[in-house]
Amino acid sequence: MTNPSQAPKPTAKDFASSQEVRWCPGCGDYAIVKAVQRTLADVEAKTENTVFVSGIGCASRLPYYMATYGLHAIHGRAPAIATGIKLANPELDVWVVSGDGDALAIGGNHFIHLVRRNVDVQFLLFNNEVYGLTKGQFSPTSRAGTKSPSSPLGCVENPMSAAQLALGAGAYFVARGVDTAQKQLTKTLTRAYEFTGTAFVEIFQNCIVFNDGAFAGFTDKDKSAEMQIHVEHGQPLLFGNDNAKGLRIRPDALELEVVTIGENGISESDVLVHDETNKALATLLAAMSEPDFPVAMGILYCQSGPTFEVELRKKVKKATSESTKSLADILHQGHTWTVTEDT
């Protein structure tokens, strides 16, 4: 008889379903699903205790490819359904998978209320700056000037920053990753798994058909060192080849600036040290964009806080323990009327 305590550690294959993975060849989603499966194996998650909930879009196919429970829900409503699942059974490990259109357009209202309530789920936002499933229309994160079937002359809207929106809505955990950076992405997903509350992870994901190269300016191998900064709690905010550049607060303004170590008397001691519990710093990091600044990756913000399901259950327990009334008494309490023929 096999001793359960001696059971072999799970592998990424243990979390892969029997379904054939079907995205466009070269799609960044392939890399993301592999990172998710590898993360679940690393943390020794239980397949029978894990649920993936998705909305509508290319990213939302992910539950089919996981050997766990899963629900392919309706457009933009995955956060609401995930909240219901977590309230019904807080012991379940719930993951929400959504795209930039699904989460930030039709699902925007659900998204902001999920993060402000701090429901204990992991939220993965696949951001490719386009509606891939419906053939390339511009999305809330598309950059101004983007030409698409729905904006043939170029998009005139300013793009939405998912990380800034999450921080503004009151999120307690905000992180970023890139589909092709497997090592860093798996590390970030592990932190998200360990966090108690809504762990929001924005993943920049290339759509090879309708928006190929959208993130090339900071993801190409010859540019990533100069145009990405990988933040780590307690470590100086350095980047570039040989960490020759850093970030500091401008002496004359409350904003970040890029400095070069060794120039104008700048040393590493002048560079900011990342504090993932500092929301003001996280907001500044989330706002950075190419080409003037590197794009911040890793855990931008992490702060513990009360979770929705725990606080709600406390209220329910208190109400039920203090009440001695029957349901009929409750329904008839307060302002009631008796209808008679005279009335």
Image: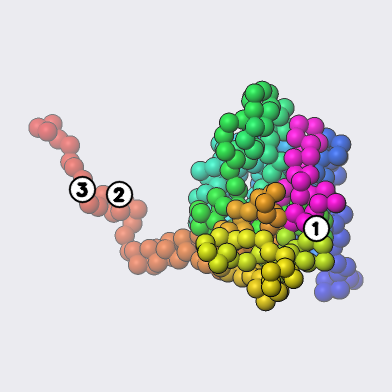
Q: Quadrant of the N terminus?
A: bottom right
The quarter of the picture where residue 57 lies is: top right
- Crowd class of label 2 (few under 14; some 14 to 19; many from 20; radius 10 Å): few
Question: Would residue 208 be counted in the magenta stretch?
Answer: yes
Q: Position of residue 246 (x, y in %)?
A: 70, 65
The structure residue drawn at horizontal position 55% and vertical position 67%, both measured from the top left corner, is 251
Which is more N-terminal, label 1 or label 3? 1
Please state the extent of the stretch shown in magenta in the rendering.
200-228
Q: Secondary structure at mark 3?
A: loop
**Residue at the spot 82% in from the left edge and 74% down from the top edge:** 5
Q: Residues within 10 Å of mark 1 (few under 14, many from 20)?
A: some
Image mark for residue 225: 1
Q: Can you identify the residue that label 2 sits on?
A: 331
- What residue type is disc 1 on? Ala
Q: Amino acid at mark 3?
A: His
Task: Tell me how far mark 3 sits from mark 1, CA to CA.
Answer: 68 Å
- Image location (x, y in percent) of residue 75: 61, 36
